[in-house]
Amino acid sequence: AQSVAQPEDQVNVAEGNPLTVKCTYSVSGNPYLFWYVQYPNRGLQFLLKYITGDNLVKGSYGFEAEFNKSQTSFHLKKPSALVSDSALYFCAVRASGGSTLGRLYFGRGTQLTVWP
Amino acid sequence: DGGITQSPKYLFRKEGQNVTLSCEQNLNHDAMYWYRQDPGQGLRLIYYSQIVNDFQKGDIAEGYSVSREKKESFPLTVTSAQKNPTAFYLCASTPDFGPQHFGDGTRLSIL
């Protein structure tokens, strides 16, 4: 069965400091991994994805994520946090095979707060 | 611009009433999804459709129904059988191997 864990409900960081939002996954076969961000009363916005290739993936707004197959992790990172990065972040996984086209399994979300 | 339009943004339901949430996309995506979002629970899949005139139950389909008569449209009906319908509902679509695209959601409340 596919699943995603985001072990931290909340992450607090000071502006200008690096941030990390953690994600681990369980999937049959090779994973397709995604990060999304959600602002209040809005839908999810796509940040970045890992399908294959380089383990370090760069995405929108200066975010990047590192795929680690041995640890089944896909942590989201940013070298220097901004107050405007404060939002709810979701990690998601999709199995590379199977008949459920595009179905994603989401973590419970991590609320990121960046303090000025 | 291409995207997903959900309407209405806010919706109120009376006891015993069915309500329908609209989802329209002009991205030419085959697959569409409905999620329910509750605080602290992430997104839970209600129904999904991979092609017109076909759909499958997700993890929490009880009390909900859908139709997929057109590629562009995937409406969700919250029936009176859904006893706790208050939530934020999100519609999404996806191309074959790309990320899901989301609408801006409908917030459903009970009067």
Image: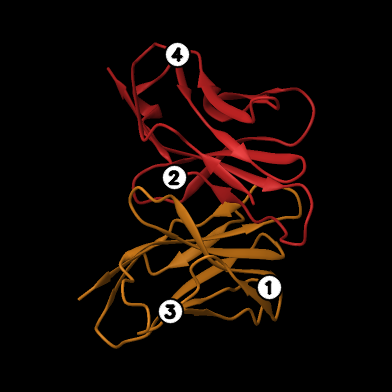
Question: SS for tag 1?
Answer: loop
In 3D space, how far apart are the residues under numbered discs 2 and 3 (Cα atoms)? 23 Å
Q: Nearer the viewer, residue B83 or A41?
A: B83
In 3D space, how far apart are the residues under numbered discs 1 and 4 (Cα atoms)? 43 Å
Q: Which mark lies nearer to you, 1 or 3?
A: 3
In the rendered image, residues at marks 1 and 2 fall on the same chain? no
Pointer 4 indicates a residue of which chain? A
Q: What residue type is labelled 2?
A: Arg
Question: SS for tag 4?
Answer: loop
Q: Which residue is drawn at 67% across and 24% down?
A: A68
Q: Position of residue A1 (x, y in %)?
A: 64, 52
Q: Residue at x 38, y 69 (%)?
A: B8
Q: In this view, does A96 lie to the left or right of A83?
A: right
Q: Chain A drawn in what color?
A: red
Q: Which mark is residue A18?
A: 4
The residue pinned by badge 2 equals: A108
In the rendered image, residues at marks 4 and 2 fall on the same chain? yes
Which badge, 1 or 3, is on the more N-terminal residue? 3
Q: Please, is residue A72 above or below residue A79 in the view?
A: below
Q: Position of residue B111 (x, y in %)?
A: 19, 76
In 3D space, how far apart are the residues under numbered discs 4 and 3 (Cα atoms)? 44 Å
Which badge, 4 or 2, is on the more N-terminal residue? 4
Dot 4 alpha-carbon crowd within 10 angstroms: few under 14, some 14 to 19, many 20 or more: few
Q: What residue type is labelled 4?
A: Pro
Q: Do the residues labelled 4 and 2 touch (CB within 8 Å)?
A: no
Q: Which mark lies nearer to you, 4 or 2?
A: 2
Rendering quarter of residue B74:
bottom right
Question: SS for tag 2?
Answer: loop
Q: Position of residue B77 (x, y in %)?
A: 45, 79
The residue pinned by badge 3 equals: B63
